[in-house]
Image (cartoon, coloured by chain):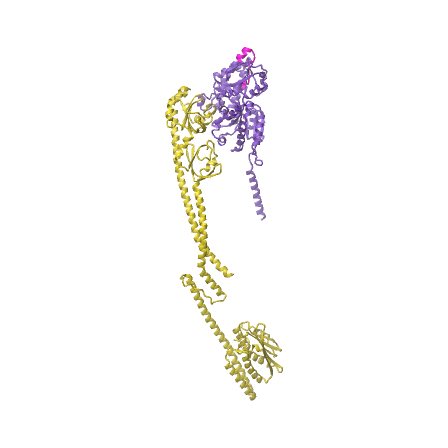
């Protein structure tokens, strides 16, 4: 579990890094292209609408100037002034000689009305609006504006129909003054809708529409069909037209998008609307296509990146797996080197393998060294037994010789000789129990002789374990200990019993029992825990055996002492069952 | 924690009250319905309350979002007082219907809101083209449109065909007065019954807007010291004195009982009463428009719809919508003609004729161009002048003053008023 978590985290990082580094530039690229395209096109439209607007407003200004000049010119005509001052209808009709030339080339574009101050007589090139009646509308509309600004040309939105059902969209007016600058009449020039329309018709192209409004937001001309001519629009709505992008809906809720530019001239606002719906539709389509492509590319990148990441990660994974195995104790693992690759990972793999080889070698040396040291220690320990035993025997011989027990000295020497011969012959580290028993019998004979058969020996070993191999010189020191420290001071009924069998774990249990004086609790504890500390008691025998057994087999085996002071001592030797 | 909770509770309470103020509708929204208080003076429509009740009932049925609540008063004066003292009376009015000649007084007391922008937004600039011009007199001043016409009547002269035979299409005031004198000389009886005070006030204050002096004068101008006007007053004074002319108060049917009795040959009234008189009388009657001069009719009478100004308010869309709809109901009522009222729009006229609701359509064509009775005068000054003139005319007709001297004196006062 831990192994999986570690490897996957780095893989995810690797995968994410690859994916991001492949997708993000693409996305940035797409966004940049879309944005630049959008910006450039918007700029193009802005330029177009600005240019168109400038041309359109100039065209409109020219038209207004042209008609203003007509008004100024006519209002200055003495014939006109005289006819109105004299209130002479017949004379007023004669102004046609002045008006008609002015209308040359302008027929169907404008109409002219010359109205006297009480609206009783007038000269009209066509029907006139009801609003030109001084008796009703002197205080409102174009008459009011003319009256209020007698020296200037004024305008007023029209929106009435002539006899021929043509629409007058805009009226211009001027006061007619007499020689004393008194108003004697009104001069009004009506402009047809078609005239205004024609001014803008060839400016801008098919995508361009116009809305002309006055300073009261009354729509004078609208080619977008979104607004009603002759009606006013709220200032809030008009304010929205100054935005770069404007969405308008027709009656069927179809949307059209415009870029709008406002140009102003003498109280009029000309809004140039350039239709950009197709552009935004195109952008929208482009964005959708881009998203689809990005999604598709993302998918492909995902797969490719995953494959590539896995491929690149594999050597790392192998190294990690190897390290995991090592941490579990298997130092024999080696990473397979790809001979076709010659990159850094190959170097890592080679290095890793080399490192393991060297570790193995070092470990081998350490093991060997440890083994040698162990063996040396064992041998040293083992070697401790033989001089110790020999010393004891020679002391015994000396004692017997001093006592003059020459028969016994002879028996002793002969038995000792057998033992020494046995020791020399059997320098093996391990012997079978059967072989060790032979040695023990000789030893016991020697001891019996020494202690004048003062103790009884019982040996009961299972036949099944006779061929089991045990370390050499394990039992003898224990028996010696029992005889010397356990039974020596006991006068009669001393028993030394040696039993051997297998326990339920399959281990060899050899028990050396004596009904001697027993051992101290402290000593018993010490021996049972020997291995952890250096010698404390100077009794080399049991301690030596314990250490040897621990070194050879580990802490699971060794000797255990059970004793009751003054009653008995039982030493249990636990060994593994080994035949080879 | 407790302190924090209290703080949040206080904030929520404050927000609640703030939002409740925001949502408070100044036109008394009640579950989404706007209530419009409609002040109606019965002066302008000759006391015909039924018409308004009919229209209001139609209105409230058509529009579920606006409910019109009428407040009827008997006279324009009462209506004006109510408008002046709205604050004290704690009563707000959104729209009003008063006589057409009250427009300038209403502007003077600041009670009405110009409607140009609303007309432009709702009807468009060509809306006025469809209006019969005479119905639009006295609606504009100083470049603004102040109200829209709802009911119009013309001054007409009715003749008892059994007593007098007058065959012209129109008659001027001077001709009428002279005719009365002639009839009196023949029969030695009162021959003309007229609301002379009102007629003469209109006549005297008729300021020729066609006078270029008036057109060009900087400031305001009213010329009453006119030979024709002095002459008319002389004739009128004489007629009252010798009882060839009897004066009655307008809008009172009681005053015309003598005509209905068949004792007086000529009656000056308006088209509204003419209808009733013709239906009531048991003798044949003809009627023709009364003119100021051969080219100029007396201004049409009637009532207008006004948008009432509210203090602190700048937007009147709902009130305007109610006013607009009310006007549309009125001008679509072809039955209006049966009551003697005149059409306001060309289509109104056409439909009325087609449906036969006008029994004497020729008089419509006989009505000539009329005039803005107070054009050229300062808006805040004509009330004073109007009262002066009425007072003066009363004294002239009672022979307390001579016309020429009285007019001269009044002209001086008028000039000083106008130059204030």
Task: Judge by depth and name the residue closer to the eye, A568 or B306.
Answer: B306
Left or right of B409 in this view: B255: right
Residue B190 is a magenta residue: yes
The picture places residue A178, in percent across and down from the top left corner, at 40, 22
Q: Tell me, what hue is chain A?
A: yellow
Instruction: Identify the residue at horizontal 49%, vertical 60% (top origin).
Output: A6
Instruction: Identify the residue at horizontal 43%, vertical 43% (top origin).
Output: A282
Q: What stretch is highlighted in magenta?
A: B180-197
Residue A50 is a magenta residue: no
The picture places residue B198, in percent across and down from the top left corner, at 54, 20
Q: Can residue A338 be seen in this view?
A: yes
Q: Is residue A447 above or below residue B209?
A: below
The picture places residue A549, in percent across and down from the top left corner, at 53, 74
Q: Tell me, what hue is chain B?
A: purple
Task: Judge by depth and name the residue closer to the eye, B59 or A544.
Answer: B59
Left or right of A23 in this view: A435: right
Q: Is residue B111 visible?
A: no
Q: Image quarter for residue B395?
A: top right
Q: Image quarter for residue A522?
A: bottom right
Q: Is residue B56 above or below residue A483?
A: above
How many numbered badges does the structure rendering display? 0
Q: Image quarter for residue A205?
A: top left
Task: Judge by depth and name the residue closer to the eye, B46 or B286.
Answer: B286
The picture places residue B253, in percent across and down from the top left corner, at 58, 20
């Amino acid at each position: 579990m831990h192994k999986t978590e570690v490897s996957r985290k780095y893989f995810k990082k690797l995968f994410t890094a690859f994916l991001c580094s492949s997708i993000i530039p693409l996305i940035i690229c797409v966004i940049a292209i879309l944005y630049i395209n959008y910006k450039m096109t918007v700029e193009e439209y802005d330029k177009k609408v600005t240019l168109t607007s400038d041309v359109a407003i100039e065209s409109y200004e020219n038209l207004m100037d042209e008609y203003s000049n007509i008004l100024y010119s006519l209002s200055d005509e003495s014939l006109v002034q005289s006819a109105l001052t004299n209130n002479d209808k017949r004379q007023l009709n004669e102004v046609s000689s002045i008006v008609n030339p002015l209308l040359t080339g302008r027929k169907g574009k404008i109409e002219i009305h010359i109205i006297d101050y009480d609206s009783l007589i007038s000269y009209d090139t066509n029907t006139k609006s009801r609003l030109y009646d001084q008796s009703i509308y002197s205080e409102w509309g174009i008459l009011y504006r003319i009256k209020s600004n007698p020296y200037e040309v004024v305008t007023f939105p029209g929106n009435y129909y002539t006899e021929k059902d043509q629409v007058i969209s805009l009226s211009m007016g001027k006061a007619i003054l007499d020689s004393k600058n008194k108003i004697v009449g009104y001069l009004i020039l009506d402009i047809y809708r078609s005239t205004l329309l024609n001014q803008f018709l060839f400016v801008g192209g098919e995508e361009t529409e116009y809305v002309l409004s006055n300073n009261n937001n009354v729509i004078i001309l609208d080619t977008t069909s979104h607004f009603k001519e002759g009606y006013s629009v709220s200032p809030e709505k008009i304010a929205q037209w100054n935005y770069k992008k404007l969405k308008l809906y027709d009656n069927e809720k179809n949307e059209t998008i415009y870029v709008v530019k406002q140009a102003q001239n003498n109280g009029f606002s000309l809004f140039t609307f350039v239709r950009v719906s197709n552009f935004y539709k195109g952008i929208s389509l482009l964005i959708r296509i881009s998203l689809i492509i990005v999604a598709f590319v993302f998918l492909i990148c995902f797969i490719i990146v995953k494959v590539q990441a896995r491929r690149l990660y594999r050597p790392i994974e192998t190294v990690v797996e190897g390290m995991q195995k090592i941490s579990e104790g298997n130092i024999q693992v080696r990473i397979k080197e790809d001979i076709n690759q010659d990159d850094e990972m190959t170097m890592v793999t080679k290095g890793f393998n080399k490192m393991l080889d060297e570790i193995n070698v070092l470990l081998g040396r350490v093991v060997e060294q440890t083994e040698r040291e162990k063996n040396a220690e064992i041998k040293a320990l083992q070697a401790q037994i033989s001089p110790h035993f020999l010393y004891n025997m020679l002391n015994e011989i000396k004692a017997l010789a001093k006592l003059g027990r020459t028969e016994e000295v002879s028996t002793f020497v002969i038995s000792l000789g057998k033992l020494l011969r046995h020791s020399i012959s059997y320098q093996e580290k391990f012997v079978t129990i059967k072989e060790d028993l032979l040695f023990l019998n000789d030893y016991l004979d020697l001891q019996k002789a020494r202690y004048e058969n003062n103790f009884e020996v019982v040996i009961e070993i299972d036949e099944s374990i006779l061929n089991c191999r045990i370390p050499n010189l394990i039992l003898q020191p224990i028996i010696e200990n029992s005889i010397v420290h356990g039974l020596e001071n006991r006068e009669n009924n001393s028993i030394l019993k040696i039993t051997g069998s297998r326990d339920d774990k399959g281990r060899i249990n050899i028990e050396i029992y004596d009904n001697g004086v027993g051992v101290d609790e402290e000593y018993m504890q010490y021996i049972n825990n020997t291995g952890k500390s250096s010698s404390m008691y100077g009794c080399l025998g049991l301690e030596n055996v314990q250490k040897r057994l621990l070194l050879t087999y580990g802490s699971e085996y060794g000797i255990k002492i059970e004793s009751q002071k003054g009653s008995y001592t039982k030493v249990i030797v636990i060994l593994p069952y080994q035949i080879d | 924690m407790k302190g924090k909770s209290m703080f949040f509770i206080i904030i929520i309470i404050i927000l609640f009250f703030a939002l409740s103020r925001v949502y408070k509708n100044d036109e008394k929204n009640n579950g989404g319905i706007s209530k419009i208080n409609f002040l109606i003076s019965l002066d302008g429509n000759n006391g015909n309350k039924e018409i308004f009740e009919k229209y209001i009932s139609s209105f409230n049925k058509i529009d579920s979002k606006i409910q019109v609540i009428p407040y009827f008063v008997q006279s324009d004066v009462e209506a004006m007082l109510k408008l002046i003292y709205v604050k004290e009376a704690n009563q707000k009015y959104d729209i009003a219907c008063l006589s057409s000649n009250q427009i300038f007084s209403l502007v003077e007391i600041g009670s009405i809101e110009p409607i140009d922008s609303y007309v432009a937004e709702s009807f468009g600039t060509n809306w006025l083209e469809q209006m019969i011009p005479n119905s639009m007199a006295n609606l504009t001043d100083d470049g603004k449109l102040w109200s829209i016409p709802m009911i119009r009547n013309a001054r007409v002269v009715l003749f008892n065909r059994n007593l007098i035979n007058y065959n012209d299409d129109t008659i001027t005031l001077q001709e009428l007065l002279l005719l009365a004198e002639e009839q009196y000389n023949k029969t030695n009886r009162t021959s003309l019954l007229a609301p002379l005070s009102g007629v003469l006030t209109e006549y005297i204050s008729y300021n020729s807007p066609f006078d270029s002096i008036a057109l060009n004068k900087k400031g305001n101008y009213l010329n009453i010291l006119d030979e024709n006007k002095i002459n008319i007053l002389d004739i009128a004074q004489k007629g009252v004195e010798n009882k060839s002319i009897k004066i009655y108060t307008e809008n009172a049917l009681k005053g015309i009982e003598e005509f209905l009795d068949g004792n007086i040959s000529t009656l000056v009234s308006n088209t509204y009463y003419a209808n009733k008189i013709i239906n009531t009388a048991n003798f044949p009657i003809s009627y023709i428009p009364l003119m100021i001069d051969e080219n100029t009719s007396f201004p049409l009478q009637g009532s207008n719809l006004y948008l009432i100004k509210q203090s602190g308010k700048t937007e009147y869309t709902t009130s305007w919508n109610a006013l607009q709809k009310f006007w549309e109901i009125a001008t679509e009522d072809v039955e209006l003609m049966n009551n003697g009222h005149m059409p306001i729009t060309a289509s109104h006229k056409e439909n009325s004729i087609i449906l036969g609701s006008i029994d004497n359509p020729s008089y419509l064509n006989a009505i000539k161009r009329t005039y803005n009775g107070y054009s050229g005068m300062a808006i805040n000054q004509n009330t004073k002048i109007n009262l002066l003139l009425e007072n003066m005319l009363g004294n002239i007709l009672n022979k307390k003053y001579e016309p020429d001297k009285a007019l001269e004196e009044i002209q001086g006062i008028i000039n000083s008023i106008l130059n204030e």
